[in-house]
Image: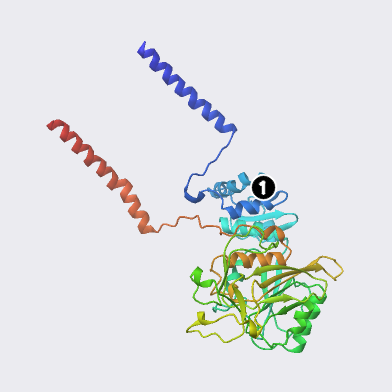
Amino acid sequence: MRRLDGWLFALLILLGAGALGYLGTRYARVADWTANGRLGLSSQSRAVLAKLDGPVEITSYASPQGDLRAQVAGFLARYRRAKPDLGLRFVDPQQDPAKMRELGIAVDGELILDYHGHQQRLTELSEASVTNALERLMRGNDRIVAFVTGDGERLPAGKGNADLGMLMGQLAQSGLRAVPLSFAQAAAVPQGTDLVVLASPTVALPAGAVQALVTYVQDGGNLLWLRDPANDGLGLDPLAQALGIQVLPGVLVDGGGAALGLGDPRLLAVAMYPPNPVTRGFTLATRFPQVAALARTGAGDWTVTPLLRSSTQSWTEFHPIDNAHPSAIRYDAAAGEFKGPLDFGLTLSRLSPSPDKREQRAVVIGDGDFLSNAYLGEGGNRALGERIFNWLLGDDALVDLPRNGVPDRVLRIGQRELNLASLGFMVVLPLLLLIVGGLLTWRRRRA
């Protein structure tokens, strides 16, 4: 009877294993139980896939020899599980060399991604490269961002603390192309420019340059103006009038900064934001080193919405601030200082006067340091900067994407570490098992 029970139990195990194998060929279910989901897609990649409306076709020009096709298919399987209409097909590059030269295929395994009539090419297989390519496909075409230069502005490719190289380097991966705009060489903003950035000039702009910017705005161009407190007297009043804004005198300070551990009252920390499409769902705290407050004049037909606002304990300080004792300042109503809360970031929108009748957008912020290389890593500064650029360019689907970054999921092991690991598994571990087994046998014999 016991023997029969054993056979029946073995038969049930075999039947169960067979049923699991059969179901495994019909249905697929993948779960990632690793720390931080390292074998799955990042939240940024999943969000990009969720916003892609319609199928994405990926063609891999990979040779059938070797395991390259299996690697490509295995890697993209994570994307296909999140987006079932993401197609993948393989083409043998050796079958038609002339066609490969025509297409410019130079790397075995090169990928071409197609979405709504737009293409992106990839020669690197990583989550960062694939997700960035999908973001560029969402934009449709690369966006041209012209940075006004020649008047002491922050440089879009500069590596200095005051420059914007780190931010623009990140944005370039998702389809933004920064180009210099010098009004010493051009009398007007070139056609095809998607956005003009005026980033904290330090010397007065020529009258012709100011007029060119005013004309650009009046004709329907998008503008980002980063305006520091020290930028007074640079001849930019006509541009402010065209936008219907006014820059308040003084430096915005916050008397409540000490409670947050901020020793300098000129450093503003913002954790709550007025209702605005740029900051919808944005919960990260941001920091602004030195700020000028802004006010609306009501001129023009702009819809002006507050973007950044100081606390009730803030005011515009008119008196010089002693860097040795910055906390010694006090609000002086008799001097005409403005009491907070005060806006220091504004978004502006209106129906463009250009023939295409699209929405024209502008952003004015009374601080440029928060996007500089020195402060970009502070809290949510980088994420806020990316949101501002995406909103200005009309790429609303990209505004609220999570910006926690796509992690590097490649395990890189040098030859020395690989040799040590091989030695451990093939020699040291078996020897330990033999020693432990020998000790147990010796103890039993003695007992």
Residue 345 point in image, percent of width and height: 67, 71
Residue 2 point in image, percent of width and height: 35, 13
Residue 329 to residue 387: above or below: below
Residue in the image at 55% along x and 28% along y? 22
**Which sits in the foreground, 109 or 383?**
383
Q: Secondary structure at mark 1?
A: strand
Residue 293 to residue 45: above or below: below
Please give left or right for residue 36 compared with residue 106 in the image. Answer: left
**Residue 242 visible from this viewpoint:** yes
The residue identified by callout 1 is: 86
Q: Residue furthest front?
A: 334
Residue type beneath disc 1 = Leu
The quarter holding residue 400 reads: bottom right
Q: How is the image coloured?
A: rainbow
Residue in the image at 52% along x and 29% along y? 20
Q: Residue furthest top?
A: 1
**Which sits in the foreground, 82 or 267?**
267
Quadrant location, the C terminus: top left
**Residue 171 visible from this viewpoint:** no
